[in-house]
Image (cartoon, rainbow, N blue to C red):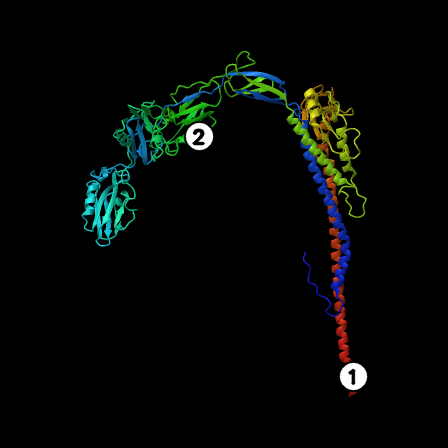
Amino acid sequence: MSDPVRIGGFFSTFDTEAIISQLVKVRQVRLDKLNVEVARADARKAAVADLVTRFSSLLSKVKALSSSTSASGKSTAVSGTGVTAAADPSASTGSFTVDVTRLATGTRASGSAITAALDAVSPMDQANFQTTPTNGTFTIATVGGGSATIKVGAQAVNSAALLNASNFATAVTSGTFTIATSGGGPAVINVDVATQSLDDIVTAINGSGIGVTATIANDAYGRANTLSLTSTNGDITLGDSGDTSNFLTATNLSGSTGTTTRTATAPMSQKMSLNHVIAEINASGVGITASVTNDGNGKANILSLSAATSITLGNATDTSNFLSATNILASPGTLTRASTRGIARMNPSEAMADASWQGGPPAAGAHSFTINGVTINYDTSTDSLTNVLNRINSSSAGVTASYDAVGDTIILQQTETGSMPITLADDGAGGDFLSKTGLLAATQTLGENAEYSINGGAAQYSDSNTVLAQPGVTLTLTALTGAGTPATVTVNQDVNSPTTAIKAFVAEFNNVMTAIDSLTRADGSKTNNQSGLLSGDASIRQLKSTLRGFLTGTGQNVPGNFTSMSQVGLSFGAVGSTVGTTNTLLFDESKFAAALASDPVSVQSFLSSFTLSASLAPAGTGSISAISGTYTGTKAGSYAITDDGSGNLTAVFTPADGGPTTTSNATVIANGSTTSLIPGMTVSIGPVLQAGNHTVTVAASSASVVRQIETFLENQAGAGGMLTLREDAYEAVSNDIQARMDNIQERIDREMDNLRRKFSLMEQAQARAQSIMAALQQAMVKVSSSSSQ
């Protein structure tokens, strides 16, 4: 709230605001003291909250120890190959051997080759190569025949053929184009692709009268396929906005540079075909004969070379990838060399309608097929082969689909091992993907069961590669073991995991003890007092004593051979240690390891033993006559049972750790019973139904030290626990003081406002008095003046 505008002292030298300010300071002294109390309460609340956090952290470490398998875990080691092993706590320690003679496999279906044959006649960038050969050179040689460099690039242009039947890389269109020289002016050249050849266009340019000579020049590989213009009449200008033919673009002249000479930036003709390259190899003079032969699928798809002497392929100076693109560079052999696999392969990332399928693509449009009853949708106009395979793999069909680029086939592998066939069907509405890929008619290789033996015994079989070799020991078969070289599996007691868990508990326990010491430290010094925030809180100090008492005591009815924490390596120091030196919990790892090795069952029991028992209070007034059984709930607490006398029982369980209550109901009859009211317990009903109440108490009948600590921590730091109640109490103190401060501030504000009103009235009265005095003085002056006259 902003201060009001205050104006005073107009008619006197009495400063009313200064007086009010001084009075406020006097009144504020009490508020300042209360502010200190609020800060102290907030600090104590924060300290308790931090302690709750520490207790929660300690509780998580305790729970890791109190687990029923915290010290009974087993570790495995495998000597040899072929298996991996895992053991659960029920496994027995020891070693055994494993021979793996067969792995379990899933059913496999392999389709037929799907890519169209290699087109040896078309330009190689349109011939269905999986990898398009690049322009450049490659080397072939024979022993005694020398070597030859084969040049891969554009074909020689067919200049005599009509333009619409020539081998231009970009088809020429009819129309006109313009060439001009600075001294001869423009010339418009007419193009008719149906009646003119490239030679005709060259003649027309040369006869245009503007001083330009057109010639068809050789490219870098000696093939006539590059158009060049030379002017004797000044700089050449190409093209005009009125041009209607793409001739200058199709011949790659439009991007050329120069003044009196303009040469095409690239050959105008199509790339060489495979047959062109084969012809150059055969004419190279090194004695090699090249041809295209059939692959294993009966398609012309293999480049074969033969010679009378050993063939050598490739050279470090090669600039074309032709030999690797035809899969022949790494081929074996001497007198004959052949592609190691088919040259032609479809692009699996291309829309299926546009890809080069053997016999054409699958039926057009949106269709589907099913694998193991799961429908896979596709559309050949938008989906690629990769899309379809990914869709199969992400479905619930239970198969893995892949494209084998070596065999040019699609492979389906059942993910579940065993001899189950893969069921396949096209959609029956014209879709033929499975038929087109050869999967529908494929002979499936049914999966096999795994075969293995333990300790050289009889063969055992499994439809999975994950097998239970011995009780508690699971093996994963990964490979066949060699004859006479079985894998050896050793099961050991796991010492590392419980050791790590105990070390974490000890560290957190000591942190909690240190925190309590710091918070409850008492310092009698009058100056520089170092007392803790909770030094006067005996209940907090008691927490430390209780926790320490658990560790120095014994468990409750714990079975086994260990009765104290010191027997498993936990202590506060040796007997006779100097007072003050045994506050830190210590862990003797070697002592724990020895205890675990000698009696792991007793160690586990000592850490995690916990049994809850339920008992019926004798003073019940309802229909229940007795309870029996073994309680299977997880928390101590009590059941308050209400009986309406008509056979309806309601039980409300209140856990001892302050957690939320739960309610269960049951309907009973006289002399009957129910097992649905209390977990694990049979509640028996007497001969007469009568309204009333019963109490069933659930308490621990057996509890290890660790479980006792766990219960204590849950009760202290959980909902309704002492620490949370203490935290709430400090918050209530803070809120109460704050409310008192607000009331005091309100009274101060009212008092000051009242004083300002009184001072204002006083000033007003003083002003009126001064006004009257001034009037009287004026009157006196007038009277005096009249008297003197």
For mark 2, give the secondary structure.
Answer: helix
Question: In the figure, residue 29 lies in which quadrant?
Answer: bottom right
**Is 452 situated left or right of 439 in this image?**
right
The correct choice, above or below, for 172 with respect to 389 in the image is below
For mark 1, give the secondary structure.
Answer: helix
Residue 403 location (% of width, % of height): 41, 27
Q: Earlier in the sequence, mark 1 or mark 2?
A: 2
* Residue lying farthest to the front in this orientation: 144
Question: In the figure, residue 98 lies in which quadrant?
Answer: top right
Taking depth in this image into account, of 627 and 180 the one nearest to the observer is 180
Neighbor class of circle 2 (other Cα within 10 Å; few <14, some 14-19, many 20+) is some
**Residue at x-position 25% and y-position 52%:** 235
Q: Mark yes or no: residue 658 visible.
A: no
According to the picture, the residue beneath numbered tag 2 turns out to be 391
Taking depth in this image into account, of 348 and 75 the one nearest to the observer is 75
Q: Mark yes or no: residue 475 visible.
A: yes
- All told, the count of numbered labels is 2
Neighbor class of circle 1 (other Cα within 10 Å; few <14, some 14-19, many 20+) is few
Question: In the figure, residue 473 lies in which quadrant?
Answer: top right
**Is 70 situated left or right of 110 in this image?**
right
Taking depth in this image into account, of 633 and 277 the one nearest to the observer is 277
Front position among marks 1 and 2 = 2
Q: CA distance from mark 1 to mark 2?
A: 122 Å
* Residue lying farthest to the bottom in this orientation: 789
**Is 754 situated left or right of 467 in this image?**
right
Quadrant that contains the C terminus = bottom right
Q: Amino acid at mark 1?
A: Ser
Residue 116 location (% of width, % of height): 33, 28
According to the picture, the residue beneath numbered tag 1 turns out to be 784
